[in-house]
Amino acid sequence: MSEGLYGVSLGYSKNYNGRDQSGRIKLTVAGDGRLMTKACAEALCRVLKSKHPNVRVVELLRGERDELAAESLSDLNEASGIADLTQAVKQCIGEGVSRQEILAVVTTAVQA
C-alpha cells in the first residue's frame, strides 16, 4: 500500500497547482492540483499561510496521472529561507570564502 497523496487548498475550490513564469500561484479545481507528500504539503502551508490564511492540506487522488509526488519545497520550486541560505553558502564556497568566515557571519546573524 502506498503513502497517501496530498495537495494544498487555498480556499473553496481553489487548489495549488504550482506557479507560472512570473511567480504567481496557479490554481485548479478541488480534487486536482500538484501531488505531494503530506510533509511537503504541510511545509507549503506554512510558507503560504501569511498571504493565504485559509490554506490547508487536502487529500488528492492520483487518478490517471503518472507524475511523482513532490517531497520537498524545492521539488515544487518554492523558495524557502533555508534553501536560499544553502545556495548562498555554496556560492560563497565557490568564490573562495573560508568556512570559518561563513560560520562567523551565520553565527552573528543567528545571535542578532
Image (cartoon, rainbow, N blue to C red):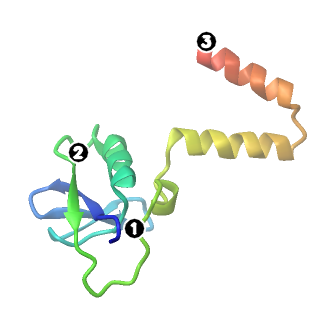
| Nearer-N-terminus badge (3/2) | 2
The crowd level at tag 1 (other Cα within 10 Å; few <14, some 14-19, many 20+) is few
Identity of the residue drawn at 83% across and 25% down = 101
Q: Nearer the viewer, mark 3 or mark 2?
A: 3
Residue 91 position, x and y percent, is 77, 46
Residue 77 position, x and y percent, is 49, 59
Q: Amino acid at mark 1?
A: Asp
Q: Which residue is mark 2?
A: 52
Residue 21 position, x and y percent, is 45, 67
Find residue 20 and name its label.
1
Question: Looking at the image, which is closer to me, 19 or 9?
Answer: 9
Quarter of the image containing the N terminus? bottom left
Q: Amino acid at mark 3?
A: Gln
Q: Nearer the viewer, mark 3 or mark 1?
A: 3
Gap between marks 1 and 2 measured at Cα? 17 Å
Q: Which residue is mark 3?
A: 111
Residue 52 position, x and y percent, is 23, 45
Identity of the residue drawn at 85% across and 47% down = 94
Question: Looking at the image, which is closer to me, 67 or 27?
Answer: 67
Q: Amino acid at mark 2?
A: His
In the image, taking residue 6 as reference, residue 14 lies left or right, namely left
SS label for mark 3: helix
The crowd level at tag 2 (other Cα within 10 Å; few <14, some 14-19, many 20+) is some
